[in-house]
Image: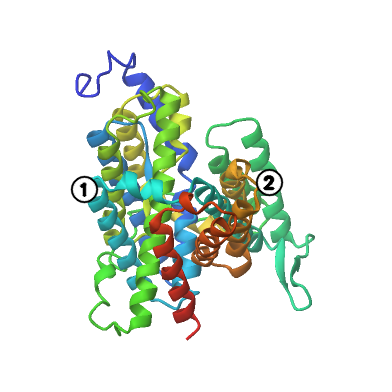
């Protein structure tokens, strides 16, 4: 084991790697409770999604640790799960089983472009400014969902949205959770989001707002309601042109967000660990292959896109340098399978702070956008604001990808537009056309 993971060469040991693995798990354990809540809004069984989340995270992280040998953990991604539930299922009216098939196909396409070396060309085709805008827009969208779940933002007939009743006990609980989580995050407490959820749940039970769980440990919930569901409805699907275009857009969006989120996370964590050599990431192909295979496996199990987590940086900061860190993190996810009764105490008010803080972290990419250049600012801005205002990640991406070639052409920067962007322009125009039918 030591030789396989090169402990001596990387100046590490079992103790360091184990501490790092547990640290990474605590930093991202919130997904075990947030993901089932979000996907249950799409009509999926919450218990089955909990099991699928833990298994997808464990299997994906094991593959990353053994194949790529990186201290990077994977789990169903925030933003991608919101796109799955609120845009694809609730927005487009696509059955969650078909949406899972879209996730599965995006994983297969990701694997193909990785194995055939197309990934670099795809990365270069999409301008960096739009990548930053997509990340920030998803962050605002997730934060908006958190504020809505908390009751801080509510529907208003006169102004569309407005401020909720802050004096409501459940809203006060959500506000308490946000304050506690912010304090923990500012103090750089590893697992701040997770511990914030724990403290909020305890406060909710103490105040009588949340019922005590009937148990703490129990057998893992059955995976039957979601396992293999991605393939059960394909035969009965009405394969009209509109449906095909919708499905292609869904697959492309899952692929796009996962692809660039993974690439950015891998580079950031690897750079922190000192793995980057001559601006290149060693074993990049194996790392991307690990991620894409985890997405396909997760879809079969019954969860949205599984991707690399930036929270892995907390494990690296704790000393993790090899894939053994990932093995330990995966072991923690497997152990978590037996704590499903705690789902009952993790209400929307409890998870609200987690969603808001994830939104804050994702919005940090705003600083990289060239706001002083209108040809960049306009498509970036439309991408960002359209996501929360239309309640659709796909719509935000479509706005940006339609306006970018237009504004760049008008500003005389035609040579900077990759041919793929023209293709995407017409793809997203078709998306709006068929969406309106």
Residue drawn at the location 44% of the way across and 40% of the way down: 264
Pick the residue in front: 243 or 19.
243
The residue carrying mark 1 is: 116
Taking the image as drawn, is residue 74 in sight?
A: yes
- Relative vertical location of residue 177 with respect to residue 11 in this rendering, above or below: below
In the rendered image, the vertical position of residue 410 relative to residue 354, given as above or below = below
- Classify mark 1: helix, strand or loop: loop
Q: Position of residue 330 (x, y in %)?
A: 32, 39
Mark 1 neighbour density, 10 Å: few (under 14) some (14–19) many (20 or more): few
Instruction: Name which residue lies at 33% across and 55% down.
Output: 220
In the image, is 339 to the left or to the right of 298? right
Q: In 3D space, how far apart are the residues under numbered discs 2 and 1 (Cα atoms)?
A: 38 Å
The quadrant the N terminus occupies is top left
Residue 217 appears in view = no
> Looking at the picture, how far across and down is residue 303, in whole percent?
36, 59
Residue at 21%, 48% (x, y): give it: 116
Between residue 79 and residue 416, name the one nearer to us: 416
Residue 192 image-quadrant placement: top right
Judged by depth in the image, the label closer to the viewer, 2 or 1, is 2
Residue under numbered circle 2? 372
Q: Where is residue 41 in the image (x, y as percent from the top left)?
A: 49, 69
SS category of the residue bearing label 2 = loop
Earlier in the chain: of badge 2 and badge 1, it is: 1
Q: Residues within 10 Å of mark 2 (few under 14, many from 20)?
A: few
Q: Evaluate if marks 2 and 1 touch, with contact meaning CB atoms under 8 Å apart.
A: no
The single residue placed furthest to the front in the displayed view is: 412
Q: In this view, does 286 lie above or below 396?
A: above
């Amino acid at each position: 084991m030591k030789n396989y993971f090169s402990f001596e060469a990387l100046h590490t040991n079992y103790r360091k790697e184990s501490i790092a693995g547990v640290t990474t798990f605590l930093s991202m354990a919130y997904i075990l409770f947030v993901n089932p809540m979000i996907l249950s809004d799409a009509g999926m069984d919450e218990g089955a999604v909990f099991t699928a989340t833990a298994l997808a995270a464990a299997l994906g992280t094991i593959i990353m640790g053994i194949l790529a040998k990186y201290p990077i953990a994977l789990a169903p991604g925030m933003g991608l799960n919101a796109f799955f539930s609120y845009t694809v299922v609730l927005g487009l009216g696509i059955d969650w089983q078909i949406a899972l098939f879209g996730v599965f196909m995006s994983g297969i396409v990701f694997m193909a472009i990785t194995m055939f070396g197309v990934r670099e060309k795809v990365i270069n085709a999409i301008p960096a400014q739009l990548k930053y805008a997509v990340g920030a827009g998803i962050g605002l969208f997730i934060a908006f969902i958190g504020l809505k779940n908390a009751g801080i933002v509510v529907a208003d007939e006169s102004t569309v949205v407005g401020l909720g009743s802050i004096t409501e006990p459940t809203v006060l609980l959500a506000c308490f959770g946000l304050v506690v989580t912010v304090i923990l995050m500012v103090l750089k407490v590893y697992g701040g989001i997770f511990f914030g959820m724990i403290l909020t749940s305890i406060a909710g039970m103490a105040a009588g707002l949340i019922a005590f769980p009937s148990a703490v440990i129990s057998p893992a919930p059955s995976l039957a309601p979601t396992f293999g569901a991605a393939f059960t409805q394909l035969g009965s699907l009405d394969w009209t042109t509109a449906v095909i275009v919708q499905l292609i857009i869904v697959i492309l969006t899952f692929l796009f967000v996962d692809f660039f989120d993974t690439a950015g996370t891998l580079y950031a964590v690897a750079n922190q660990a000192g793995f980057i050599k001559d601006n290149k990431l060693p074993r990049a192909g194996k790392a991307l292959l690990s991620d894409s295979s985890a997405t396909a496996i997760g879809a079969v199990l019954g969860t949205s896109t599984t991707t690399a987590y930036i929270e892995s940086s907390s494990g690296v900061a704790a000393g993790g340098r090899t894939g053994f860190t990932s093995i330990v993190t995966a072991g923690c996810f497997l152990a978590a399978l037996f704590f499903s009764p705690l789902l009952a105490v993790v209400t929307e008010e409890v998870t609200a702070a987690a969603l808001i803080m994830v939104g804050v972290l994702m919005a940090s990419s705003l600083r990289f956008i060239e706001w002083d250049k209108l040809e960049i600012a306009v498509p970036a801005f439309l991408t960002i604001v359209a996501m929360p205002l239309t309640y659709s990640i796909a719509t935000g991406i479509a706005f940006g990808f339609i306006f970018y070639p237009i504004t760049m052409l008008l500003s005389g920067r035609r040579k900077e537009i990759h041919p793929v962007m023209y293709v995407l322009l017409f793809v997203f125009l078709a998306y709006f056309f068929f969406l309106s039918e």
